[in-house]
Amino acid sequence: MKYLPKTAQLQAFRAVARRGSVRSAARELGVTQPGLSRTLRELEQTLGTQLFLRSSEGVTLTEAGLAFSRRTEWIMEELRRAAEEVEQINYFTHGRLTVGLSSLISLTVFPQIAQTYKSALPQVTLTVREGQLNSLLPGIRSGETDLAIGSIDPMRPPEGVMIEPLFTAPFCVIARKGHPHAQERDLFALKDARWLLPESTEGYYHHLQNELAHFYRQISVTPLRTDSVITGMNMVLGSDYLTIVARAAASPLQMADKLVTLPISQLPAAQYCAVWSQKSAMTTNARRFLDLLREACRSYAW
């Protein structure tokens, strides 16, 4: 390839790929439809391949177009981040930071970190996405999320990302007060209980399923699955469901009068890590957040 695509061509391609229509993309970009079509033809000539299939119903991506679309999204996100970071350094913009957090981090150290961070950098727009690591990783890999914190399965660390261990958290089984199994000490005695567990293909709960595979096979009632903390707590409080949570998550919920921790010691601890893109340099704003995160995690009683 003699020449590389121009930024304007990438912007035009992305708009059409997202909209599925040259007319709609032209309106979005504020250009004429013939002008946009010409830009797309020039891009296809530069790449030496057809990117779109055109029909009366709109445009769809060819196989080459799909591959180019994935790369284009990442390139444009990196360009935005690069320009924004330079502006952040020169204080010409407010800047942005998007972090992904597990519910444990949201319930424990995040309020303190957010207060300190916003006091030091009030101009930064801080966006938080909560979820398990498997739901946060796509944003990390695409560049839409700067930094994520979650539990890692030591036997299956995620690929394509940088990982920094932060702390280890013990986990426990919780139930409502008055639950028939509230005093049970043996995990295997709970095989006939009703369980609520998060759905996960990464992290602690996936590791737990492997570690306790023998127990999982003995559970007589298929566990209810949810990624919602609110749904989980409501099911535990309003029924006889049991669930497994980090021990440190119980106190911030302020439900000591409603929940009990079962005296079971057979659960492995979870390793929580900071995760960021292997392909992208961490922004100044993200590095500052990570510094505060390290300090908060070191001093917290997990």
Image (cartoon, rainbow, N blue to C red):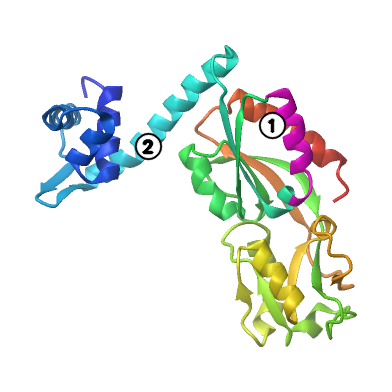
Work out whether residue 51 can be spotted: no
Above or below for 244 versus 301: below
Residue ID for mark 1: 289
Marks 2/1 in contact by CB < 8 Å: the verdict is no
Q: Residue at x 69, y 31 (%)?
A: 289
Q: What residue is shown at x 64% (from left), y 86% (from top)?
A: 221
- On screen, residue 154 versus residue 186, left or right, reads left
- Pick whichever of labels 2 and 1 is earlier in the sequence: 2
Q: Is residue 114 magenta?
A: yes
Q: Which residue is mark 2?
A: 73
What x and y, as percent, mark residue 149?
66, 45
- The quarter of the picture where residue 262 lies is bottom right
Query: Closer to the camera, 130 or 64?
Result: 130
Report the front residue among 282 and 194.
194
Residue in the picture at 22% in, 40% down: 24
Q: Position of residue 28 (x, y in %)?
A: 28, 35
User: What SS does tag 2 mark?
Assistant: helix
Q: Label 2 amino acid?
A: Glu
Q: Find residue 117 and report its horizontal and vertical position in percent.
A: 72, 30
Residue 11 has which mark?
Answer: none
Give the amino acid type for the residue marked by disc 1 in the picture.
Phe
Element carrying mark 1:
helix
- Provide the residue span drawn in magenta: 107-121
User: Mark 2 to mark 1: distance in Å?
Assistant: 25 Å
Q: Is residue 216 inside the magenta stretch? A: no
Q: Is residue 168 above or below residue 213?
A: above
The vertical placement of 230 against 164, above or below, is below
The answer to whether 290 appears left or right of 268 in the picture is: left
